[in-house]
Amino acid sequence: MPSEYRLILKHVDQPGYTPDIECYLRHGGYEVLRKALALKPKPLPDGRVLSPQEQLRDEVMRSGLRGRGGAGFSCGLKWSLVDRKSRKPIYLICNADESEPGTFKDRQIIYKDPHQLLEGIIISCYANDVHLAYIYIRGEFVEGAKILERAIAEAKAHGFLGKNILGTGYDLEIYVHRGAGAYICGEETGLIESLEGKRPYPRIKPPYYPAVLGLYQCPTIVNNVETLCAVKHIIAMGGTEYAKLGTPNNTGTRIVSLSGHVKRPGYYEVEVGKVTLRDLIFDPVFGGGLRDGHTLKAIIPGGVSAKVFKAGERVKVPRRTPDGKETFAELDVLDLPYDFDTIAAAGSMSGSGAIIVLDDSADMVEVLANICEFFAHESCGQCTPCREGALWMCKILRRMINGGGRKIDADELLRIADNIAGGRTICAFGDACAWPVLSIVSKFKDEFIARATAAEARRGKQTVDSERGAQCAAEPVSAN
Amino acid sequence: MSVARTTESKPAPPEVEKIRVKVNGREIEVPRLMPDWQGKLAPTTMLQACEAAGVTVPHYCYHPKLPVAGNCRMCLVEFGTPALGPDRKPILNPDGTPKIVKSPRPAIACATPVSPGMEIYTNTPTVKAMRQGVLEFLLINHPLDCPICDQAGECKLQEYSVDYGQSTSRFVEAKVHKPKAVQLGPRIVFDAERCILCTRCIRFTRDIVGDDALGIINRGSYNTITTYPGTFFDNNYSLNTVDLCPVGALTSKDFRFQMRVWFLKETPSICTSCATGCNITIWSRGNKIYRYTPRENDAVNGPWMCDYGRLNFKWIGRDDRLKDVIVRGQKTTWAAALNELADRLKHAPAGSVAIIASARQSNEELWLLSKLKARLGAFSDSVPRTGEADKLLVNADKNPNSNGARLTGIAGSELGANLGGIASGIANGKIKTLIVFGEDVTKHGLGPDLLARLDALIVSDILPNETTRRAHYLLPGCAHAEKSGSFTNAAGRVQRFLKAIEPPGDARPEWEFLHELVNNVVGGNGARSIAHLFDEMARDIPAFRSLTWAALGDRGVELKI
């Protein structure tokens, strides 16, 4: 029977669990930090000595933890890439700019269990010799920022933060920095620029890899809220134990944000890869199925940037047989285990863990128009393909839903998206705005053609001039 | 931040490691490190390697003298690197060549360093498609108003449209509208709809000038370059952004709508507004100058020049230019005037003549005057002209050729030190003849009363002033744009300038009539071309020895002084 596995959300939503430090301490809070700070240098058989920091980093590497922000990059590997020889300060930034549409997991932690996040940050900072950390929080989380400020003050008062933490001589300051409401600030180098007080234009890589040239041109670690919380549990249980959760290379638990046309939308913490999309959508402990009388049409498996799955679509994915051999299996998308690798092999991504379920009441042209409005508004405008392409696609879709569609528009959308995707832009936003177009238009092309055909018929023998009129009517107010 | 200077006078840089890369299948060797925008050694980029291979990579935002932005995406290329086995050694193909793994994603050539064995592909169908895609994106919201755009003829959008453009637009939506004819500053007009947001202007004023005057507001396609509310883009280098702007977004208030660039003739010249000697191009049509633009010379001005120097040419076309040869108030011919002058000077007693030349004159003219000075045993000097300097290009010495005046012996190390002596020489009646070139000496201690005591006041100038009004002999001269010659800048660099337009009326280049006069007085009959004159001077003056007019080239030669 599929079920939730609450590790990070263990106490969240328990009756009587409050975000203050006393409550957190009553539930064993900051014990893992004490454990981490108490680590002693460990001599190895070959004569080398592992510092406490190296031991902590080794645990995270052993845990196989992958970033929960969207890219699923190995956390241990990210930490190992940090330039520790430059003698520059190392910064850690907690990316709390949760803004991928469909995602609402980090806010559960921030609002309901802020000290768990702080403990994760403090341990991660200690492990990486960081003395200054920032929590970059989404501007719209006004209350969340206040909660975090309060939690930081409490942690300081209890000696978990500030100078000489718990008498160990380790100093750490954490500052909360509020964003001003831009999706692009979730991109780590855009976030860094914003934190430096500039427009959040993502940086070109090379040369600006945050691990080497990050905040103020110093080595910087940027980790998602959920990732940093997972670090706490990894240190608590040991990397090897943590790696037993989930499936190989897709270890641990992750919080799924389930939304759309299901009976029980919400956030569910599950072991990675242990439940399928079918479980998440239809099982009574999760989504509980679609609204009565409706059938499944599409699944967006990892936030709106992810490529859409069409109901009934069959995908070929690698599977490991019980004796360890790699084979391929053809599965219905609903039977895909919800992890990083299988969803990627099926041509999409689990991204930020946001699953958006669409039933037969959804008009895919409207769905895509909605998604493209978002991306056209959020493109920072730094590089050409995304700046011009995102709004172009949006304008075509506005025209289509306002009755100005042409049959060639579907192919036009695919062509434009192709000119944005595939690493042609500075950051992943280009792919993020192109993938929904590429997948929705190609998988639901009949809907686009049908809508355009109907519109062309309605317009009948109207002249080109009046067609232009229809387009002008579709022209909305400026984005700003 | 200062303009990068070349290492001509510095010792040769140490040997740099070379690496071999392939560009479109052709193997070339490039240094592992090459100068970046500040001249510091940095890992060689794909774009630099392609340039070394003679392969052009189109680009908008990249500029060799600005920090890399990487935002236009026009320089995207495909590439591959040698495959490495588990032992970190290259995997070989059956024929012994290293196996190349092609990157699944393209890279921007402007910012991606090359690595040994890398293969760069700029001519694949994918690369062509990417360039076409970027160009299409840049044009969809562009007003396509080339017929009324000043940039037409020197516009990168036009140029790349020829290579990667399509004949029809697939864009049927309404374009984004943005502010037009924005007065960004006193000298700059901005059309936000033409702007492709390459940020060259922002980076220039922030990173080269140190004036963080420009920025971007709004998001996505609505991005617009602007100044902070209530402030202006008015630093003394603002017009460089007009040159930098690859499209017609930033235009010069002075030049816009004046002339199509393809009608203009380009003449290499030197800016005369200070002793820096910025290399410039004079753009003229017929006898009218339309604009100056900087001519790149890393040893002097890099690709920049100041706004003051750039606009300091209006006086050349003034209506009140001196056009006639005048002797004692009567218009006459050059031949008559020069013969009379030669006779007078030949018979002048030693010590009775003084020469006040101008450090705005060319080396050749100053040298000819110095020959006259030697023959007549004359006193001489030139007028100092100082003002404010800045950190970038503007020199405190406002004369373009103070060093020329010193090297030819017309002035001592301190310009103007002899002016007082000349004044008292006139006052006590010893000096009877004064030759003045290009200066209004009434402003420099030789008032009308003193000038009235002279037997002969011989003046050559370009514009009328109190001195020219009192001249017994008035010889109309030329602006530097109307003649050829050379200046020696503050750093001792000898640089030549060429004639762009004809002088007005009977005005003649000073070197030409001085040469005639000097030959009449001193004797001899030298060459009549500026090249021969320069070479003759170089043989005569120790500091210039070994120089030739031809060897000066377009970039000049730095003297050891």
Image (tube, rainbow, N blue to C red):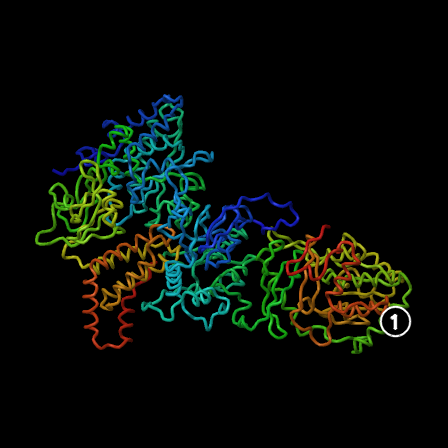
Number of marks in the rendered image: 1
Residue B95 visible, this orientation: yes
Quadrant in the picture for residue B451 = bottom right
Q: Report the front residue among A249 and A397.
A: A249
Q: Is residue B213 above or below residue A80?
A: below
Residue B8: percent from the left, percent from the top? 64, 50
* Chain identifier of the residue bearing label 1 in the image: B
Q: Position of residue A169 (x, y in %)?
A: 40, 25
In the depicted view, which residue is nearer to us: A340 or B303? A340
User: On the rendered image, what quadrant is the N terminus of chain A found in?
Assistant: top left
Q: Secondary structure at mark 1?
A: helix
Query: Along the line of sight, which residue is nearer the eye, B509 or A260?
Result: B509
Residue B500: % across, % down: 65, 69
Q: Is residue A80 above or below residue B246?
A: above
| Picture layout, residue B132 above or below residue A239 | below
Q: Position of residue B223 (x, y in %)?
A: 39, 58
Decide: few, some or many residues near mark 1? Use Cα within 10 Å; few <14, some 14-19, many ≥20: few
Q: Nearer the viewer, residue A268 or B558?
A: B558
Which residue carries the number 1 mark?
B343
Q: Residue furthest left?
A: A293
